[in-house]
Amino acid sequence: MTDLYPTRVEGDATEIPRQDAVVRGTPDDGPLDRAQLDGFDRDGYLTFEDLVTPEEVEQFRGELRRLAADPAVRADERTIIEGTSQEVRTIFEVHRTSEVFARIAADPRLVGRARQVLGSDVYIHQSRVNLKPGFGGGDFAWHSDFETWHAEDGLPRMRTVSISVSLTDNYSFNGPLMIMPGTHKTFVSCSGVTPEDNYKRSLVMQNAGVPSEEILTRMADEHGIDVLAGTAGSAVMFDCNCMHGSNGNISPYPRSNIFLVYNSVENAAVEPFAADRPRPAYLGARDVTPVG
Amino acid sequence: MTDLYPTRVEGDATEIPRQDAVVRGTPDDGPLDRAQLDGFDRDGYLTFEDLVTPEEVEQFRGELRRLAADPAVRADERTIIEGTSQEVRTIFEVHRTSEVFARIAADPRLVGRARQVLGSDVYIHQSRVNLKPGFGGGDFAWHSDFETWHAEDGLPRMRTVSISVSLTDNYSFNGPLMIMPGTHKTFVSCSGVTPEDNYKRSLVMQNAGVPSEEILTRMADEHGIDVLAGTAGSAVMFDCNCMHGSNGNISPYPRSNIFLVYNSVENAAVEPFAADRPRPAYLGARDVTPVG
């Protein structure tokens, strides 16, 4: 298969225009209207106030607490524990291990939006719940998710969206998601070869797949940086190729969210484009059964 | 001398109501009007758009670049160099080592405001220029400056203000100053004994003088958190006892500022209240010659 988006290359990183449509559905396909679809096409993301109810937020938070306290979950390789605090930071594949999270992952409010944008049935490429503690929660440097999913999981085209449902209020000061709007239309090829089992380190700190500071500066100058504040229960849907990141969090207020990655069933993973073998299925699913 | 604000104590940290007036001057004394003085009394800080001109900003930035490139400055103990990048992060006592910074430190636009709030002549307790790089500049945890200046430098009363002049644009996303407005009216006594030569570590990471997370959470719930964005040339004046801090900065945009601490000549430093000996004079001046 032709590699439309070569990355992890020797020499300088380059920018490649996006080869794939951003929005494939129409307003008739449902829940998003023309303005929203146009906004997603232009900015690469949309936010939704109150996508889930306060009662659901409470239920999800309870489920997250339950999982984080379960010794079996803590010992599972799909759980990332922060070194110094020994607190749970991320739990992957929760749509398979939790009935509560399986239900929201298949909920029409989420799946309908993903289907409409991607123009087909969708399956879950990755799911996780994240906990970013207050009083010093870490940052996450700028990156495109697609760069990793293409290089290390083998997603061939840009036909994937993420939906993040906030379980806490997001302020500008507690390390919220930041997106450079419009950057989803350019693929930033990254220099450097993927180390073996890169995922074991890259979940904590990115090594390969890091765009150059020169390109990031130019992109920020051109596109600006949107800081996505919002209340618990709100959500953001963003394109797989958005340049995004988050600052650390010294505030007392932790952040947690449910993160679901929907991929078009017509964009199933093939062999990785820049790694010896695919990452484990809990990071990049190989099972393309449609959801919802 | 009675210690009105005991800190670095054994056992749990406590909260002590402020014993000192926040504002001593009147609108007749000079540049600040009644609303501004009331605002400073209530919130513990004031911001000023365009306190200095764009030409001055350029001059200050040039002077900062010159100092940061000077091998003698880099080797000076008053210069803090970041370990990994080997870049200059802070240069202290610039009002004595740079004519340009000496001039702005004595400028009526700054000194007049400090005098008016503090109700007396003032001298410079500390001066510095700060550089917070983009792409991963570090955070600074919540603290009251007065706690340190009282414990380690011997400032007896709360009669000190800081003025920070921005040399770069400050956005919500590049690690700007954050203040919990109104916290200057409560002294948070901190637990733990001051280690010898604490300043050698505390400029990089706070060890002693750290308020408890419980108190910080309650303060944030009660007072909120103000994020002080502003353009280059703007300034913020804040009370010595404001609870403040800053997040890290993954954005491409560095932050730099000139930071001047004005203390009332009637509040000269005595022996430290919670340390064996005072910090070096470049961190806490012992010379109380009035400025401006």
Image (cartoon, coloured by chain):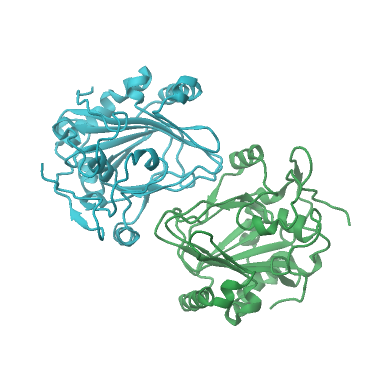
Chain colours: A green, B cyan
Give coordinates of residue A292: x percent, y percent.
68, 78
Q: Quadrant of residue B64?
A: top left
Residue found at x 48% / y 77%: A62
Hey, which residue is sitting farthest bottom in the picture?
A99
The image shows a total of numbered marks equal to 0
- Judging depth in this view, the residue of B147 and B175 nearest the camera is B147
Q: Residue at x 30, y 62 (%)?
A: B218
| Residue B16: x %, y % from top left | 18, 55
Residue drawn 74% across the image and 40% down it: A13
Q: Residue furthest right?
A: A1
A258 relative position to B132: left or right: right
Give the answer, above or below, for where A80 lies relative to B203: below
For this orientation, the residue located farthest to the top is: B99
Q: Quadrant of the C terminus of chain B?
A: top left
Q: Is residue A181 visible?
A: no
Inspect this view and state whether residue B172 appears: yes
Q: Quadrant of residue A217?
A: top right
B111 over A266 or under it: above or below: above
Q: Quadrant of the N terminus of chain B?
A: top left
* Residue B94 horizontal side relative to residue A221, left or right: left
Q: State the residue in front, B27 or B201.
A: B201
Q: Position of residue B262 (x, y in %)?
A: 25, 32
Q: B24 above or below B53?
A: below
